[in-house]
Image (spheres, coloured by chain):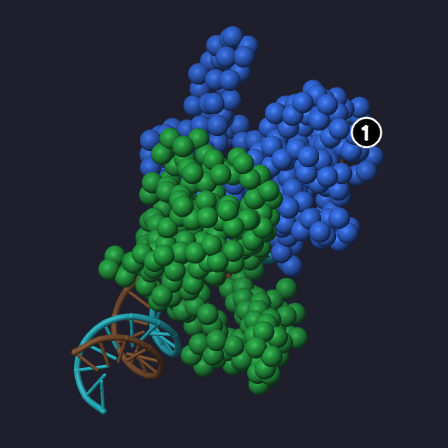
Chain colours: A blue, B green, C brown, D cyan
DNA sequence: TTGATAATTTGACTTATGTCAAATTATTTC
DNA sequence: GAAATAATTTGACATAAGTCAAATTATCAA
């Protein structure tokens, strides 16, 4: 596993793309670089374990990362799926910063790469804490990040506790479909090209991970895909999902 | 319902007890008071609804408050139970502060009092946002608050998705029992008295609310209490829970 | 290309938890 | 303190979702 993990020289340009750091000066970014490091990970590589000693927070630069918990029986639940330029593992910095300073903090969750060629930035917590004292503007960014995370978690809990798996899956597909349209529009704008319009998108994660994210297991997920297909809301072919009735899908998922 | 809601004159002493404001000066507290108001609520009174226009964040002064979501079928899930001096409904302030400024923000969750004589403080978001710009030290407090909330939510999700109801209830009882011991020790220290030692505590919320908090319904909760009783881990008599085998209860709940 | 491994699907079955209705117990109010 | 209301318990039953095993399909590596 460790053989995939290599070091690379980072630049301040890499940091600038990270929302959290977007307002910082070149000088400040250089400072942050001085106590950050870079890690590459292949699919399935563990970034950190639940209860492992805390080093600092992470940021996805490339690929994607799952944050998950495991039950006593080995069942996995994916709480978050992180995409490039989003940070994770920051909670201990603020939740228990005295523990961080005394090297007593631990990671609150497991993190693993779910794509090959995933790259993450790791920011050492202790120097970052002193950095923050002189750069309070970054606090607002963190407040915004954590608030958004709380909102996502709230929705997640709502889904898991109040909706059955069919509704949860319908909602996931609806949202992922909308996301895929947005991403496409961005590419068209950036590259000034026109992509052919389609009602399909590719699942960005494996069905195993999707099941673990929706709070179920792969067999149930498979059957639920079929139910939505039988009702002519979607068409499933491997990882390719075609939305047949967006209006109905949206209505059902709410 | 509204007839129970009365206004009261607040002082800076009321604010000082709130963790979030504990480091502020008298002058700063007076400022906050100028754009805060006070509300009394009886058991069951709604403080705000999901999707209702956002006014500001709240803080429990007396009693307790549940934060909950409701499913299409009317089932309730309690995400948080807030006790005195903890704040809630702050997420929009940071998550969508532009919406707050433009009066487009909404509350992300429902809030209702679960005790008679509950009192809350309501801090108007817009003036608070400008206050914060000059008092960045309060940002750290908020970061700590939100981080702790994230941790609680993480644990909540873990429980709901990876443990069955018996384990969730065992965990709740174990933690509540430990809390009750702490509270008792605090009273003994404060009042310099010795309370008689006991292995019992009173459920601080109704069984209906407990069921909604554990992600189940009252009938299942009732049966689950019985199971734990049959295994001689606890004894249940109304709201009085006696812990018979703490070690086993702890072991089981992890 | 082919065998090997991993991912997904399908089927038969079990089980935990939810639903509905009725009985019991606790709490409030007059 | 009795009646009324609310909270909780119990029972019979329904069902969504999990378990285990086997089959199928997709993906990867030589």
> Residue drawn at (46%, 58%), measured in percent from left and top?
B14
- At x 52%, y 56%, the residue is B16
Q: Position of residue A232 (x, y in %)?
A: 36, 34
Q: Is residue B53 visible to the viewer in this orientation of the structure?
A: yes
Q: Quadrant of the rendered structure where residue B250 is?
A: bottom right
Residue at x-position 56% and y-position 44%: B138
Relative to B209, does residue A97 appear above or below in the rendering? Answer: above
Looking at the picture, tell me which residue is in the foreground, B78 or B9.
B9
| Subunit ID for the residue under disc 1 | A
**Residue name at image x 68 percent, y 38 percent:** A133
Q: Is residue B170 above or below residue A233?
A: below
The kind of secondary structure element at disc 1 is loop
Which quadrant holds the N terminus of chain A?
Answer: top right
Q: Position of residue B109 (x, y in %)?
A: 40, 48
Dot 1: within a 10 Å radius of its alpha carbon, few (fewer than 14), some, or many (20 or more) residues? Answer: few
Q: Does residue A58 appear in the picture of this structure? A: no
Give the residue number, with chain letter if any, for mark 1. Answer: A7
Compare residues B223 and C12 and report the one nearer the observer: B223
């Amino acid at each position: 596993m460790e053989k995939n993990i290599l070091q690379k020289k980072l630049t301040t340009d890499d940091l600038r793309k990270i929302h959290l750091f977007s307002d910082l000066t070149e000088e400040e970014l250089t400072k942050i670089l001085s106590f950050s490091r870079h890690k590459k990970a292949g699919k399935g590589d563990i970034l950190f374990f639940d209860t492992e000693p805390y080093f600092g927070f992470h940021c996805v630069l490339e690929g994607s990362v799952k944050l998950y918990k495991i039950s006593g029986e080995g069942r996995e639940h994916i709480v978050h799926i992180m995409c490039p330029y989003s940070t994770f593992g920051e909670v201990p910095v603020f939740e228990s910063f005295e523990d961080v300073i005394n090297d007593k903090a631990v990671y609150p969750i497991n993190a693993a790469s779910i794509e090959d060629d995933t790259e993450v930035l790791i920011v050492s917590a202790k120097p970052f804490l002193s950095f923050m004292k002189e750069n309070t503007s970054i606090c607002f960014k963190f407040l915004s990040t954590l608030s958004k995370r709380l909102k996502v978690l709230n929705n997640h809990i709502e889904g898991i506790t109040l909706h059955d798996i069919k509704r949860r899956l319908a909602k996931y597909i609806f949202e992922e479909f909308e996301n895929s349209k947005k991403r496409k529009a961005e590419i068209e704008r950036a590259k000034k090209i026109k992509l052919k319009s389609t009602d399909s998108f590719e699942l960005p994660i494996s069905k195993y991970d999707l099941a673990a994210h929706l709070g179920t297991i792969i067999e149930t997920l498979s059957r639920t895909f079929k139910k939505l297909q039988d009702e002519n809301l979607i068409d499933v072919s491997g990882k390719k999902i075609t939305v047949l009735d967006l209006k109905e899908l949206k209505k059902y998922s709410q």
